[in-house]
Amino acid sequence: MRGTVAFVGALVLVAFGGGHGTGRAADPPAKGEGKGLPSLADALKESPGCLGVETARTASGKSVIFAWFEDKKAALAWYYSDAHQEAMKRFLPDAKSGRKPLADVPDDSGPIMAIASITPNDKPTKENPSPFKQIAIELYQPLGSGLAIGGRFAPEKMKVPPRKGEPKK
């Protein structure tokens, strides 16, 4: 679990310039923003098997990164990449876990969307010095349902299953 937390914390903190900001929900973070490290969102885009990356800030104040991977192998390539490992060491140096990353994801999982979200702690205290109130990473897979007019939220490179009754492409 802590390995997952480190992934999210490092990912979001660096990509959003430390997790603090006064931008409105519609304001995306600046490209390359990142307190001394290159943006992890930019590094994600260069990771083998990463199909696309989107960033957002929600109305409730969460900073979010959506990253699409071809499969479990691609997600693990990112997890063990130099950029990600450096960010984990920098932002969460004490986070250690004996658990294997993506242990519950089958090897033949197909495409994976990772959503990393963080809510900054605007007023850290002595009792709670953490820079964030909430941090999470969630993994999702595409379903062959839904509606897409003029395109999808997922990158074009991502293979989305066809709807029932629809021929496979």
Image: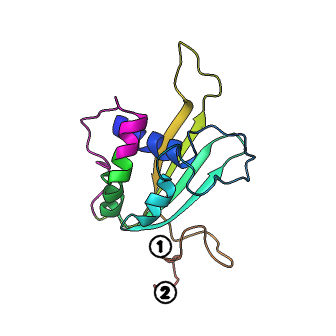
* Foreground label between 2 and 1: 1
133 w.r.t. 76: above or below: above
17 and 148: which is toward the camera: 17
Residue 163 in magenta stretch: no
The numbered disc on residue 131 is none
Q: Do the residues labelled 2 and 1 touch (CB within 8 Å)?
A: no
60 and 105: which is toward the camera: 60
Residue 105 visible at all:
no
Residue 33 screen position, x and y as percent:
57, 50
Q: Is the magenta region chiefly helix, strand or loop?
A: loop
Which residue is disc 1 drawn over?
A: 158
**Quarter containing the N terminus:** top left
Q: Is mark 1 on a helix, strand or loop?
A: loop
| Crowd rating for badge 2 (residues with CA inside 10 Å; few <14, some 14–19, many 20+) | few
Q: Residue at x 46, y 86 (%)?
A: 169
Which residue is disc 2 drawn over?
A: 167
Q: Which residue is drawn at 65% across and 28% down?
A: 122
Q: Distance between the residues labelled 2 and 1?
A: 17 Å
Q: Which residue is drawn at 48% across and 76% down?
A: 157
- Residue lying furthest front: 36
| Crowd rating for badge 1 (residues with CA inside 10 Å; few <14, some 14–19, many 20+) | some
Residue 120 screen position, x and y as percent:
60, 34
Q: Which residue is drawn at 38% across and 52% down?
A: 83
Residue 124 visible at all:
yes
Report the magenta residues as a range.
Answer: 86-107
Q: Quadrant of residue 153?
A: bottom right
